[in-house]
Amino acid sequence: MNPFEAKYTSEALELLADLEKLMLLLETHPDDASLIQQVFRNLHTLKGNSAMMGFRTITDFTHHLEAIYELVRAGKLKISSAIINITLASLDHLSGLLNGDKQIGDSNKHLHDILTNDIVTILDYSNEGQAVSKGEQLTIVTDDATIYKRKPAIPGIRVPVERLDTMMSLVTELITLQAKLNVLTSEHPQPDLVAAAESLEKISTRIRDNAFSMCMVPVENMVTPFHRMVRDLAAELHKEIDFVTEGTETELDKNIMEGLQDPLMHLLRNSIDHGIEEPALRQQTGKPRHGRIVLKAYCAGAHVYLEIQDDGKGMNIEKIRRTAIKNGLIDESDVISDKELQQLVFVPGFSTADQITETSGRGVGMDVVKRRIADIKGRVSIHSTEHEGTTVIIQLPITLSIIDGLLVKVNGADYVIPLSAVDICHEVSSVQLMNGFAQVMVIDKETIPFINLQEELVGVSAARQSHEIVIVHYGEKKIGLLVDIIAGKFQAVLKPLGRYFNHLDIVSGATILGDGNIALVLDTNKVIAQSLNKKSKAI
Amino acid sequence: MNLMQQADSYLTFTLDAALFAVNVTRVLEILEIKPIVKVPMSPSFMRGVINLRGNILPVIDARIKFGMTDTPFTIDSCIIVMGIGAGKDPLLVGVLVDSVREVIELREADIQPSTGIGAFCNSELIVGMGNTGDNFAMILEPDKVFAADELMLLAAAS
Amino acid sequence: MNKTVLIVDDSDFVVQMIRFTLEQEGYTTLAGVDGQDALKHFDGRHIDLVITDLNMPKLDGLGLIHSIRLQAAYQHIPIVLFDSHSNSDTDYLMKSGANALLSKDMMNEKLVSTVKQMIG
């Protein structure tokens, strides 16, 4: 390497950093001549230095960019948001080149060509005597929002992931310890101690929330490869597809995001392969030639939702029904709503594709997607209208490791029911339990099935008197769970049970209580499913 | 000059009346018996989990694993924390035993291959019989006895 | 005695590179960060050659050349003007009073030969 390369690179990067600051100032002061002059200067210097080092590509690219500012300086061009965006994107590109091998290769060729093209177009455009004024829609600029995505101006620092993980670990230990302190304080209540414990609890909660927010990343971060994939696959299959993202500033725990990459890729592939029809077919049925796939992210309650919506051909209910019957999943005579039928695609081995296409893979189907999403404690459902399109909705917890729960005792043992699943609680004495064949209870004229957790979890038949009922959501239904007593709300730091219990799904983990005891965290959906399973087998 | 043979240290413990041994390099610590929380839908040899300084430790009942009768705890009952599996992150498991005896030194010469008779002289689980001087201890290989995968298969089948 | 070359460019990087290259060849070098700064050196001392960038703040290459030529002592001093792109308007630049033009991307190859050609 040329001995001067290091010096060249560091000076070039300084110039770029300065240019970035100038661009942001220019955005709010587009007519400031001295800013424009400084931008021009920096670009000129960068160009010169690069020429001296013999870096042809960087020199030429910078030359074009410099030419824009020469025109601006001469009054032949006005600063517009398009110009600013292109410049910023170009600065990023140059930065990438400088930090790399200063050559154009596979990874940056596409971007390089697009930027060069756009810059040259602006130059030609203005040379024909038309000023590109601020705010005017430049139709020549590539529609590709991702390329012109600017890096946020908010300063940040790089932190190794391991440090974040360590911090999270320490935070959860802090919460556990603080819970213990609460217990001790209630056993030895002294005014000063109680006040201090309360303050500690408040601060711990704030630290917890702050730490979590550090581990949150916007959905935007994982979306970039999707754009690429959609473009490439659509081209390969001769389909015309617009891929749009909404709400990608929504944040998710980074661990959850990692678990989502594969399932989302698969769902997108499905939409492109099986959902969106060929352009000609679409036109025949009165749809626009371009198919549309939307990836939407939003928060609601304690969950983050991700939706993949396509306006393709939707799912054929009859076909699903026939396949389900053929695979023995349902009987001819079963009465099942269309909605429930659609969810059958998540059952392993279910496939209505007449031939398993190469893109969507053999048997690597929706059941795997569902499992991967379940691994990150999420849920997925599919909603489709034939001929109109299909929407897949993924519901995710905001974070994995701390949940708000309801502490209950069943047969003397402690359990935690996630608050997100809980609807309402009742005392047994206030409701009517019908212990017949179908265990239901009547509350406010509503009949709700119930399960005795003592029987379900421990296997003994109602040894102790159950005093309370926790009513939880089960899909769209409500089910009551009978417990001994409800001990109160609890912030549970979820700890995995470990590999020895991997097979177990009714318990999602354990948590350590303030007094050192262990409470098992229940996955109520699985508990109820198990109970229903047993009952149906018994019939 | 006699060749000084390498001697390894083994921790001995009892299950029922039988004497067992395990290489100390696999033993992380010994705990007094403490309340074990039973996990539903788990096989009988999975006693449950305990709180080990803020972490969840699974506890296996060695007696049940070896097919012995289950008896209540005594004051001598202990939990031996062992590390299973290779690699820098061994899987930790607690093993419930009737009592813990002393640590003994055994040279290669002191270890005979297992005789193959007896209820739990399964040659896969027992790597040999160690001569303690006045007794024989069945030497366990923790990786084989408490392998998570095998146990999970058993659990799934039950 | 060594020949003395004055290098004027607002990029420190460029100045370093050229100084290094020329000093290897046995020349003594002086530097200026722009036209105004460079003029300080024209205080009567002996300078054999000036290499100057075109675009600089305060006083640019053309302005510097003009100022140098105004001084009797330095009227005939050889001046090389360099520019960062080879597409520039060479006629116009040559009228400025420079003796030679060099573009930065040819700098690597042509620098030493040009200097040697001009002052030996």
Image (tube, rainbow, N blue to C red):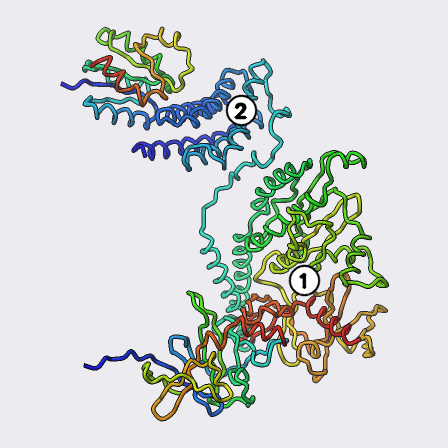
Of residues A196 and A94, which is closer to you in this image? Answer: A94
Quadrant in the picture for residue A479: bottom right
Q: CA distance from mark 1 to mark 2?
A: 52 Å
**Within-10-Å neighbours for mark 2: few <14, some 14–19, many 20+:** many
- Residue at (62, 25) in percent of width and height: A135
Dot 2 amino acid type: Ile
Is residue C111 shown above or below C67?
below
Residue A406: x %, y % from top left: 65, 69
Residue A62 versus residue A198 in the image, above or below:
above
Give the left or right position of residue B42, taking residue C79 as reference: right
Q: State the mark number for residue A119.
A: 2
Q: Is residue B102 visible?
A: yes
Q: Where C112 sits versus A283, above or below?
A: above
Horizontally, residue B109 falls left or right of residue B148, namely: left
Q: Mark 2 belongs to which subunit? A: A
The image shows residue A505 at horizontal and vertical percentages of 63, 68
Q: Quadrant of residue A81?
A: top right
Disc 1: which residue: A420
The percent coordinates of residue B138 (x first, y second) are 43, 85
Q: Which residue is located at x 51 percent, y 21 percent?
A: A68
Q: Position of residue A23 (x, y in %)?
A: 50, 30
